[in-house]
Image (cartoon, rainbow, N blue to C red):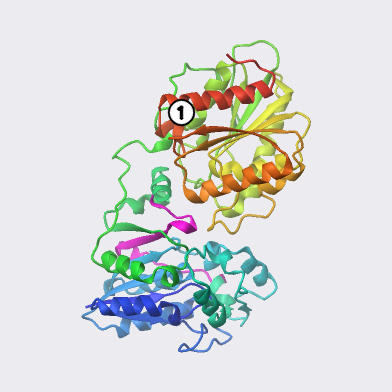
């Protein structure tokens, strides 16, 4: 018999699985919702030594109680994946599969806090001792604060009220104690259940795997499967029947399997949509300069890639086809195309990436071949948030900001991003700075929503925004959709940027 051991998000207990457990039992499986120590009725009371190891032991007891004949499937939701991973590492021979339910992939030495999307948790921990065994407690969010832990899409008001009413304080040590893994559980089959309204999709996972980061190679293992659920971070409340069905299919080994790197070139390494001649390229620290055939100082366009891009990705973004392509194209039209390799590797890195960009801009403006009074910044994808600083206080030399398929507000599971990086709010003080925004028709709904909110804010503030539409284009259309429509849109966007720099293009 299959036994599902269900371990929930922070501040919650076994009660949250009520409807899912009932569905699983009706299908003939056993369901064992776990209330971890200190997490409410039915569980042990948290003492001063309650930490992540305590919660790992809670899950181990549930595994041992399942019986030797049972096929154990461990399900970890959000924070719950940490004690689940610890238990699977201790009992790999007893666990048939680990399900990451809208949860990350914790690694040896990671504290759970590293994957917590709510920055308010870190602030609370700074006001407690925050060390294992200190007895500190992190209060649950108020009724209106649960969205900081993940999208509430699909959660009814009654269920949200119950969530707020039954939530328990989280022992600080469970969030701060590093997870210890020996590697014994690495061979246990796993399934990722991606809640698309919370920003997790197969397309994004496949893109991450395609980056070549060695830490993500395990995702293309045939024992790893994936499912999508069209709901927010709390599917046990918003879609219990659908979640139960996915868990049963996961236990049977079903699900989508990622294609291996050998299947085809990943999108970011496919050819640029225009066949362009080589141009002189120089590397200066984090910046590549694509140089035009021209005498005298020329205007420059600084190209800012998206992210987060894992630190181990090779080649780095300045060598990706999209950015070498735009660099050559701009150089062919008489401008210096400057591509920055910034260090946006995680949600806590936006400030560091912003510093990298500011440093790169000064390097570019200081080059004698660049007219430092005619510079544009062009942001792509997740790099769109980095436009906020420049919109909020545009310097006189900044003639234009461009953004292509941008993310213009943190996505639902990007909670650690500083409030400073909000381009829509920054428009309030953008003045007459022109903005060229390229929008794709086949954008992910959560990203499209950030663009719509930005355009609404632009209208309210009277900002100068030109929209270039690619009706049939996808996110990354320059290498995914090499069509006449795409080429025309890229040319129009580049032409508009260069006109703002005082270059006339045909």
Provide residue 473's location: percent of width, then percent of height: 44, 35
- Residue drawn at x 69%, y 27% is 375
Task: Please give left or right for residue 285 compared with residue 256 in the image.
Answer: right
Provide residue 479's location: percent of width, then percent of height: 42, 32
Provide residue 216's location: percent of width, then percent of height: 40, 51
**Magenta span:** 176-202
Task: Please give left or right for residue 87 compared with residue 152 in the image.
Answer: left
Provide residue 98's location: percent of width, then percent of height: 34, 67
Q: Is residue 189 magenta?
A: yes
Query: Could you say which quadrant of the image residue 353 lies in?
Result: top right
Q: Is residue 196 magenta?
A: yes
Task: Please give left or right for residue 447 compared with residue 220 in the image.
Answer: right
Q: Nearer the viewer, residue 16 or 270?
A: 16
Residue denoted by label 1: 486
Query: Could you say which quadrant of the image residue 437 lies in?
Result: top right
Task: Confirm whether residue 184 shows in the render.
Answer: no
Q: Secondary structure at mark 1?
A: helix
């Amino acid at each position: 018999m299959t036994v599902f051991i269900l371990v929930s998000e922070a501040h919650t207990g076994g009660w949250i699985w009520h409807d899912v457990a009932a569905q699983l039992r009706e299908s003939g499986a056993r369901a064992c919702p776990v209330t971890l120590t200190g997490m409410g009725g039915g569980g042990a009371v948290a003492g001063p030594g309650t930490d992540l190891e305590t919660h790992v032991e809670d899950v181990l007891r549930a595994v041992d109680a399942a019986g030797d004949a049972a096929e154990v499937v461990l399900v970890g939701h959000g924070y719950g994946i940490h004690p689940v991973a610890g238990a699977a590492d201790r009992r790999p021979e007893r666990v048939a599969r680990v399900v990451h339910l809208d949860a990350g992939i914790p690694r040896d030495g990671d504290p759970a806090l590293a994957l917590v999307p709510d920055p308010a948790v870190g602030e609370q921990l700074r006001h407690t001792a925050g060390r294992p065994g200190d007895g500190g407690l992190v209060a649950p969010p108020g009724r209106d604060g649960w969205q900081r832990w993940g999208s509430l899409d699909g959660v009814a008001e009654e269920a949200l009220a119950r969530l707020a009413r039954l939530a328990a304080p989280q022992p600080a040590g469970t969030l701060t104690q590093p997870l210890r893994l020996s590697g014994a559980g690495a061979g246990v089959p796993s399934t990722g259940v991606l809640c698309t309204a919370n920003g997790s999709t197969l397309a994004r996972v496949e893109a991450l795997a395609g980056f070549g980061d060695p830490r993500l190679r395990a995702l293309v293992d045939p024992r790893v499967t994936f499912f999508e659920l069209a709901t927010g971070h709390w599917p046990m409340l918003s879609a219990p029947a659908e979640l139960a069905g996915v868990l049963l299919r996961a236990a049977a080994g079903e699900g989508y399997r990622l294609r291996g790197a050998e299947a085809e070139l990943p999108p970011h390494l496919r050819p640029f949509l225009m066949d362009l001649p080589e141009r002189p390229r120089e590397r200066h620290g984090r910046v590549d300069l694509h140089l035009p055939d021209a005498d005298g100082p020329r205007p420059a366009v600084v190209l800012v890639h998206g992210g987060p891009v894992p630190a181990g990705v090779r080649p780095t973004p300045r060598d990706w086809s999209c950015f070498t392509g735009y660099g050559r194209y701009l150089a062919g039209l008489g401008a210096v195309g400057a591509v920055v390799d910034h260090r946006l590797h995680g949600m806590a890195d936006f400030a560091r990436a912003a510093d990298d960009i500011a440093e790169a801009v000064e390097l570019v403006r200081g080059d004698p071949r660049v007219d430092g009074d005619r510079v544009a910044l062009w942001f792509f994808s997740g790099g769109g948030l980095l436009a906020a600083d420049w919109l909020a206080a545009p310097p006189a030399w900044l003639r234009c900001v461009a953004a292509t398929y941008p993310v213009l507000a943190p996505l639902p599971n990007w909670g650690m991003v500083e409030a400073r990086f909000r381009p829509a709010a920054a428009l309030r003080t953008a003045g007459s700075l022109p903005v060229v925004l390229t929008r794709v028709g086949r954008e992910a709904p959560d990203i499209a929503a950030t663009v719509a909110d930005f355009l609404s804010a632009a209208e309210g503030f009277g900002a100068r925004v030109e929209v270039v539409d690619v009706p049939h284009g996808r996110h990354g259309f320059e290498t995914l959709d090499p069509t006449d429509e795409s080429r025309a849109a890229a040319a129009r966007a580049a032409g508009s940027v260069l006109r703002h720099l005082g270059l006339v293009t045909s």
